[in-house]
Image (spheres, rainbow, N blue to C red):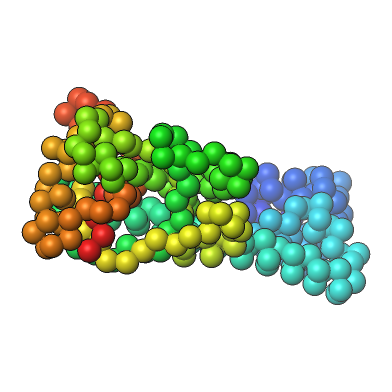
Amino acid sequence: MKVNEFARQLGIVSSKVRYYDRMGLIQGERQDNNYRNFTPQDALNIYHAQMLRSFDMSIQESLNAKNEELEAIDQWVGAHAESLEEQIRWQEIKLLRLKEMQAYFQMIKEGRERVAPLFRDNSYNVWNFGTGAVRTPGVQKAVEILSENMPFSYIAIKIGVQSVIKERRPLDVSIGLGILERNKKKLNLKLPAEVERKEGGEILQYMLEVSDPFQLTCQDLKPLLDECRRRGKPICTDIIGRIYLSYMRNGVFVHGIGLAGEI
């Protein structure tokens, strides 16, 4: 039987058969007329190697596996099962983050500069740039942890309440990093004790787009401030939010921001 015919019966390309042959996976005896005496055992070896290959076992590893006891194969399978579970876990978190971005797109589509009540997921925020930043070894460590775990952490933004009350121009804006409680748990992150504080509860979220977050004024926040006053909950704490995404809009680079007022 020629290599082409054997490959056709297996449902694979002939180059793979030749590769497996070079690797010593099959033993088809050569005949004088350029035919090979391929056996069902050769076919079984190839199918078995392909099955293991689908789990990322190399051809050389599959060859070695032929000489391994059950316990060794079990260990290999167990290690790869754990690795795959970890990959799936990370991919699930990535999917959640992408869906969060999609939710932001939808909010923007539904109306820019709008105010809507919602429940803010518990989150941890660390401020490392701006007058409101605290630079201690613990904070620095937290920043490093959250930087390394993008995109599961996010860019956080804070507007100092005193600058809002006194209507300073511009407002006192600090940025840093944050992470939702659910993502922190899924990643099994251990943040320094001094930043282990959760912030959640009912809020009014205000969506806006700005080209320079550090030049925000009370006028930019007027819809949020007016709605808080209307509800009898004037701003009395720092306004905290996140920068969801940055992009071009009408030829201008802008940052899509969600800010929260407590209610």
Residue 72: x percent and y percent? 86, 68
Q: Is residue 70 left or right of residue 181?
A: right
Q: Is residue 57 above or below residue 250?
A: below
Q: Is residue 189 left or right of residue 2?
A: left
Which residue is pictured at 81% across the width and 69% down the height? 75
Which residue is pictured at 38% across the width and 53% down the height? 98
Residue 187: x percent and y percent? 56, 60
Q: Is residue 135 above or below residue 59?
A: above
Which residue is pictured at 45% across the width and 51% down the height? 125
- In depth, the one of 79 and 53 nearer the eye is 79
Q: Is residue 36 left or right of residue 11?
A: right
Residue 62: x percent and y percent? 80, 59
- In depth, the one of 255 and 76 nearer the eye is 255
- In depth, the one of 150 and 120 nearer the eye is 120
- In depth, the one of 39 and 158 nearer the eye is 158
Task: Tell me the quadrant of the picture where the N terminus can be found.
Answer: bottom right
Which residue is pictured at 17% across the width and 55% down the height? 234
